[in-house]
Every structure is written in C-alpha cells, then in structure tokens.
Amino acid sequence: MSVERFQAVVGSNRAFAQAVSQFEQDVARNPEAQDLTALYRSAVTAALDGNTDLVSFACGYSLCLGEIRSRTDDGFSAWARSFGDGNTPPVYAFATAEYTLGRNLHSGRFVFSTDPAANGITTQ
C-alpha cells in the first residue's frame, strides 16, 4: 500500500465510502473474506470504549478498513493504541488518519493489512 493511495482514500469522504462499498461487495462474494471480516471486526470492536463507536468496517482479500467516531479528542488514538493488545489476530501494516467533525465529535479512519506479504506502507 502506498502512502499516496492511503491518503487519497481516507482523505475523501467519497473515496472512502467507495472503498468500503467495494470491500463489502468483495466480502459478499467470498466466504474467506466473510470469515476474515468477522474475525477482525470482533478485534476492532473489542478495543472500543464507551466514547467510541465503529461507523464502518470491511475487509477485502488482504486489507481491512474502517472508521471509528469518538466523543473525545483522544478517543480514536486510545482505540488505535489498544487495538492489537491481547488476543488480536495479526495486523502487519496499520495506518490511521484523524479528523475533527465538530466540537465534540471526532473521526478516525484506518487501514491495515492481514497479509504478512503486505507488511508495510511505502512512498512509492
């Protein structure tokens, strides 16, 4: 995954919605992707607290992406730090972007790899 592609997807509401939709379509056609999505959704939601909610989440064949909303300034950051603690399935590359939506509402979008061969984010 390239930094440029990551920024283009998470930085645009339209591009992000399209990516989530495409991943959801992929999941609907592939039992392995359905299992992967269920496994990682469970890990993502386990790290949520009372101030954070999962807005969207889907996995493709080797990447998962989603959005968390928080009612505190550091809610998404706290979620990102706690995601992966404990019994989480492996995550090989993890990138996040945070946005303020309003005075008491913050959003964080994330992408991570579930494939050990895709274990980094590059500038190329």
Image (cartoon, rainbow, N blue to C red):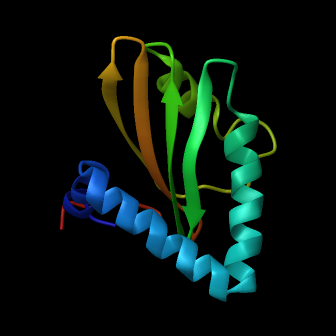
Q: Position of residue 72 (x, y in %)?
A: 49, 13
25 or 33, nearer to the observer: 25
Whether residue 49 appears in this view of the structure is yes
Q: Position of residue 58 (x, y in %)?
A: 58, 62
For the N terminus, the image quarter is bottom left
Q: Height in image: 89 above or below 29?
A: above
Q: Position of residue 114 (x, y in %)?
A: 59, 65
Whether residue 118 appears in this view of the structure is no
Q: Residue furthest bottom?
A: 29
Would you say 103 lies left or right of 34 here?
left
Q: Height in image: 32 above or below 39?
A: below
Q: Residue at x 51, y 72 (%)?
A: 23
For the C terminus, the image quarter is bottom left
Q: Residue at x 24, y 48 (%)?
A: 11
Q: Position of residue 69 (x, y in %)?
A: 50, 31
Would you say 121 lies left or right of 5 here?
right
Q: Residue at x 61, y 32 (%)?
A: 53
33 or 112, nearer to the observer: 33
23 or 122, nearer to the observer: 23
111 or 23, nearer to the observer: 23
Q: Height in image: 60 above or below 12?
A: below
Q: Height in image: 93 above or below 2?
A: above
- Please identify the quarter of the rendering in which residue 115 is found: bottom right
Would you say 105 lies left or right of 99 here?
right
Q: Residue at x 64, y 37 (%)?
A: 83
Label count reads 0
